[in-house]
Amino acid sequence: MADKKYDVAIIGAGFSGPILAAKIAEHGVNSRNGERLTIALLDAGPYFPGTHRAGYGSPLRRRVFTNLEDGYERNYEWDDPYLAKMVGGSSLHWGAVAILPTPADYLHWQKETGVDWTEENLRAGVAEIRREFNIHPFPEQINTRGNRLFFEVAKQMGYNPYRGETARRNCIYCGYCMDRMMCKYDSRSSTLGHYLPTAEKFGVEIIPETYVEKINIEARAGRGIARSLACRTGGSNYEIQADKIIVCAGFTNTPLLLMRSGYGPREWRGNPILVENANIGKHIDGQPPTPGVSGWFDEPLGDGDLGSVGGYTMIHDSRPDAEGRLRLNASFGTAQLPSQAAMSPFAPAYGRAHKQFMREKGILRAGNIGLLVTKPSGRWQIGPDGKLVYGGDHRLTLQRFQEGREMARGILEKMGARKIVGMDTPVNLTPQTRGQHRVGSCRAGVDPKTSVVNLHFESHDVDNLLIGDASVIPRVNSGNSGTPQASVTVFAAGRIIERHFKR
Ligand SMILES: Cc1cc2nc3c(=O)[nH]c(=O)nc-3n(C[C@H](O)[C@H](O)[C@H](O)COP(=O)(O)OP(=O)(O)OC[C@H]3O[C@@H](n4cnc5c(N)ncnc54)[C@H](O)[C@@H]3O)c2cc1C
Ligand code: SF4
């Protein structure tokens, strides 16, 4: 492929890249001549275009009804450079659980690095994502008996459970998208259906199957200027020049790309560092999960004709500053994929009893209260050799897990569970720990000594380089990270247009 030149090159077409591409293409102009911008949106994965009618899917996309492999946490290790290998990225295999930022999240963001991400400033971004992604509560008709029982009991015990929200259109609640599978009908809202069509309409060139190996940074006296991208497609290499380069490669791939490009912490043991910023790949905040606590009941808790129904969520704080915040996710009487049902802790060992369990849908008598510490005390970071390490003082996290388990057991007992499991499962905070809601690896902030980009999403150290994905968020939010991060990206687009793409 021949070398090319654009006004803007955006790396990564997952959740954030398409939002930025669409908004900059629609509302921005070349500040020198007022003309439409030339924008390239690059992604390492393939692109399956078509008219994405939610609930129908596009013919091409339907043929690739893919899922992430079991044990997908492998993707968080550094030998696999992709998370979701498609244009649309994580917005295609996400669970479409939509928990927009809470008041504590706005305060934590501001407190951490001084960003001005107030509820007021993000209001328009949140409203846009709610509208575009059709965020609404899971319908009551598809609730289960077990979930309702959980709600009543938890309420009686003084807790505050609420029905979760989801981002879907024309969903038939068949449940096939459980366990990280993509929806064959494109009912789950994604950037493939919502922002990429706008991006294309306003002239963005989508360049799939192109892996950006490096950003070419010219270094001078400790600062840098981003000039171009070293790209690989198939067996060939080529270069893309751009006046502005915006990185949206996700919370792991963004810092790794910067470090490969010679921009990062001095102790990095890969390519030589030309421009130093000690915060790249550090301060990664996420939600270390435990398997939760499960109960087994005498009677079925649901009739099993619907899957993916979404239960109740409960946020619990033990401190006024919301550190160590717990989220409990209740799911009772929900049908499960046979592969999951067979591995239930309540399924008898293989043999006649196991077959009986499967035939009689024994799984419908089980329920789970999942546990997440959404404001953990420890953090991850990318070490000098590129491996993820968890560190810091995580005593509060472990204490809160234990308290969460006790709460879950108390609720299950009151609900009448005959058998309860999961109280003793070891909590594993090692680098391999799953937990997809990770942010902060190139966090935004006012002080260049403690952050990577400024309040306008521009690198503190490298001119013409901006970042707009999950890696800029200074602290993880209370719910899943996708829709809060998308709201921040809408806000980022406004700021970037204002500073760079206005006449
Ligand atoms: C299994 C799973 C389930 C989730 N479920 C939910 C949920 O239910 N609700 C919720 O709110 N959030 C959920 N999330 C979180 C949410 O998906 C993420 O917060 C969000 O997708 C992050 O968006 P991003 O743009 O930062 O990264 P991504 O969406 O991961 O996009 C990064 C893109 O960059 C591309 N890329 C990376 N490196 C390069 C490179 N060098 N060159 C070219 N392209 C590159 C990748 O191919 C990818 O398309 C889930 C995440 C996972 C993994
Ligand atoms: S339950 Fe999942 S797979 Fe089924 S239509 Fe809804 S989003 Fe798609």
Image (cartoon, grey):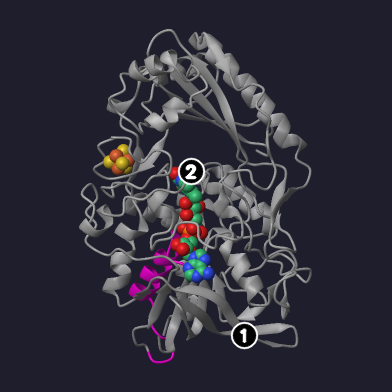
Q: Tell me how far mark 1 sits from mark 2, CA to CA.
A: 41 Å
Q: Is residue 90 above or below residue 492?
A: above
Q: Tell me what residue is drawn at x 26 percent, y 54 percent.
A: 63
- The answer to whether residue 366 shows anywhere in this view is yes
Q: Quadrant of the C terminus?
A: bottom left
Q: Is residue 106 left or right of residue 301?
A: right
Q: Residue furthest bottom?
A: 33
Identify the disc placed on residue 150.
Answer: none
Residue wearing tag 1? 225
Image location (x, y in percent) of residue 106? 57, 49
- Extent of the magenta region: 12-33
Residue wearing tag 2? 70
Image location (x, y in percent) of residue 405? 63, 23
Q: Quadrant of residue 85?
A: bottom left
- Residue 185 located within the stretch drawn in magenta: no
Q: Secondary structure at mark 1?
A: strand
333 and 481: which is toward the camera: 333
